Amino acid sequence: MKKLGASLLFVILVCAVLSSAALAKQPYSSYWLPEQLLNWNPASDPDAAFNRSTIPLQSRFTGEAVNPNATKDPKVMALSALNQGTSGVPSQGSDTFSANTFSYWQYVDKLVYWGGSAGEGIIVPPSADTIDAAHRNGVPIMGTVFFPPSVYGGKYEWVKQMLQQNSDGSFPAADKLIEVAEYYGFDGWFINQETEGGTATDAQLMKTFLRYLQDHKPAGMEIIWYDSMTKEGNISWQNALTDRNAMFLQDNGNKVSDSMFLNFWWNDLGSSAAKAKSLGRSPFELFAGIDVEAKGYDTSLKWNLLFPEGKPAVTSLGIYRPDWSYNSADSMADFFARENQFWVGQNGNPANTATSQAWKGIANNVIESSPVDQLPFTTNFNTGSGEKFYVHGQQVRDSGWNNRSLQDVLPTWRWLTESKGNALTPSLDWSDAYYGGSSLKVSGTLSSANATHLKLYQTDLKIEPATKLSITYKTQNKPSMKVGLAFADRPDQFVFLDVKDKKASGWTTDILNLTPYKGKRIVALSLYFDSKEIISDYDIHIGQISIQKNANPVKPLEAVEELNVIQSDFRGGIYGDARLKWNALDNDKEVQQYEIYRVLPDGKETWVGATTNNVFYVPEMKRINAEQATVLKVVAVNAKYERGQAASVTIQWPAYPKPEAGFKADATLITPGQQVHFTDLSSEVTEGWSWTFENGSPAVSTEQNPVVTYDKEGTYNVTLTATNSSGQDTVTKQALITVSRGASGIKNVALGKTATADHACGPAEDAGKAIDGKVTDNSKWCALGNQPHWLQVDLGKEHQISGFVIKHAESGGEWSGFNTSDYSIQVSADGVNWSDVVHVQGNTAAETSDAIALVKARYVKLNVLKPTQGGDTAARIYEFEVHGLQP
């Protein structure tokens, strides 16, 4: 097939009205209940291709310790919820800066992508971007199979479904787990069975299930077992390796699981280590768990039982929920500061973790590992998120983004500075970047008295003929900087290479020839800062460091072939999204990433996103000035961050729509002289507003959100006409505003009344909790099971009702992704015949208020149609208020 040149344009005409099969929709990471897993097929899953990782697990090595306490034997397993929910996780990052871009991979040997709930799914593969980031850093990453306790909605039938065995001895669910891991490209499963109801027979069958996985999994895939179920089948956390749970690790000389995570309340780890050795297993295949979800580095722990002073570690370390650093932070800068203290310690120096505090940082006990062992090596110090995006120093996006697939291997030591005075301060900085969203910033007062050696990367790179090192930087001062290299023959000594000492207010690249050192192996990479003059405001950004073999330069990449819009959709005539697909280039090993750009009406291009995959979802774009068509470009970028030729595709917009009128009032039952605030809810294409307020002051208005006063008692209509260049639309709400001297008696008439519901997650979360007037202390109604969920309140007698207030999950301190998305409210006089009074779609707010035209009713029903922002099916209502008059 003819290759696509930069000028060749594929034109895809997309109709304004599309069948449901053509709707693009945001692809999300997978999650399943057992029955869904058994029925899963990537060919029929429209999101499956977007959830694949394309980065193989890189090799890595452990060098010499910089901390005298750290040793190589103990390993670290992290059970981390890298996304805030199981459902609603975009497959390829999103358009927000804030994200858990975990980056201390050097201290983690296995990462478990923690997730799963009864309301979403209990089988959770890692999201593709987390697989990419883990693999680039040489860390295997596992999905989670979580059978929750019954108090959290667990059903033992799910365990039974997973353990279903065919007559030939095969386990369909085990085969599916292997298929999923191979298709998505991750490294195994963490299995946590905590649902009560098992028997000794079930335990034996679980052991057989695990053995089946061992016998059929491909090389390199790992199965990890959690200390929960015992050989009797019941749930009893041993907090140790004992005779009651050992069969899930090793049985009659046969490996059952590759490792085991011991529950948190351990005391005598020595007995567990001895038990492992008696089974022929290493004690470092046991991971003594610590729970840091609530308090992070303020968690009280008996470190000496795991890492006894002056003695070898007893077992390995398992960390449950180190995502505390992100969840407890109030900004990305705060997140990175907390991360540093968690992993490196209070001093922010992995070589010096001495402190009076109990938490010394993981660096105190574990030697850093590094994947930087082959050329080419390039880092842009890109954290995987940013407030903007830059390409070769040019800003190509002015809004936030995150995508962990784009995260670079970040410095091994954060931060290892050596100085006789006050060392300069290094940091990862989002204010400027050369390529991506961040750069390395070094600042402070610089002089010969505080010359600073900043050790960055532990490496194992062989210098070949024509190998060159380039460094790209920006500073208003002279750089006063050298690049340091330590070699394998003398790892404690650094050779310093001069960087041209000239001011560089724009990005400047200096290329350093490494040929004099050919044949040597670089074991450490650093920067050295020194100045004979005192520079009180020294500030430099390092945008890129790259070590390349230039003997065989990389050829520019050609344009991708078969670029197509495989799905597209429009909303409101001014928003559109698309799913793109193209053929990956044959020389895919040279492709670092594919970047997607939107061509604006003025011809400028803006960065939409990037992927290592050959499919990409273009998030919803807003139409600009009634443009008729939008061009999207895909550009391949090689390992040197050189852009190849562009392929293009065009999307045609539908005819510009006329507006759809809509509005709401903040109150509908008022006293004479009271103001009503009207909020325009018309479609976004509206250009003009014409209001009519019966007996209101003013009686008419052209403001978008007018405020109106009503002086006379009565019931009045409100009309809004919305207009634009394509037409107009009018809506009238009959008898919307009631003015009465008795309106001052409005109260929450549902408070303390009788409530029923379709379901409750438990006795402590029944329907009555939604009308008890409490939002604190986790007082909420929660419902699992089939949708829609419903909550019905008997007010005891008829009331004049004027509106409702609902306090959703976020009001009670839960994640905003659990706020109710879609709901309706009905009223009834007899509890049999119902009238609809409220219908809301797409809510994201923590608290909603819905005023209605005055209606008389005794019964009120809240129908939860879409309980959350994602796929979680659990309703969470902290308070349901019904506002009206006492009879």
Image (cartoon, rainbow, N blue to C red):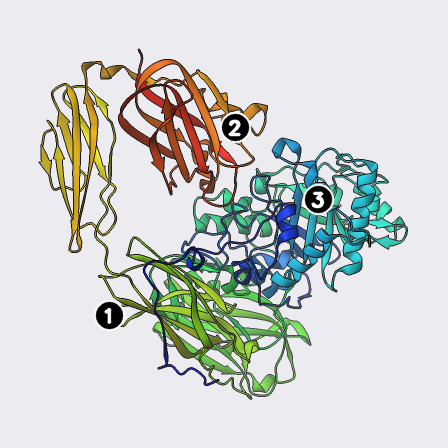
Name the kind of residue labelled 1 in the image. Answer: Asp
Residue of label 1: 602
Report the residue at 25% width, 48% height from top. Answer: 683
Position above or below: 31 against 395? above
Name the kind of residue labelled 2 in the image. Answer: Asp
Q: Earlier in the sequence, mark 1 or mark 3?
A: 3
Residue of label 3: 161
Q: Which residue lies furthest to the front in this view?
A: 833
Relative to 345, 781 lies left or right: left
Residue 357 on image: x %, y %: 61, 41
Residue 883 on image: x %, y %: 32, 21
Mark 3: secondary structure: helix
Question: Residue 193 or 98: which is nearer the viewer?
Answer: 193
Q: Which residue lies furthest to the top in this view?
A: 887
Relative to 308, 9 lies left or right: left
Q: Residues within 10 Å of mark 2 (few under 14, many from 20)?
A: some
Question: Residue 110 or 334: which is nearer the viewer?
Answer: 110
Report the residue at 59% width, 88% height from top. Answer: 465
Relative to 463, 333 lies left or right: left
Residue of label 2: 758
Mark 1: secondary structure: loop
Q: How far apart are marks 1 and 2 (CA)?
A: 55 Å
Mark 2: secondary structure: loop
Contact (CB < 8 A) between labels 3 and 2?
no
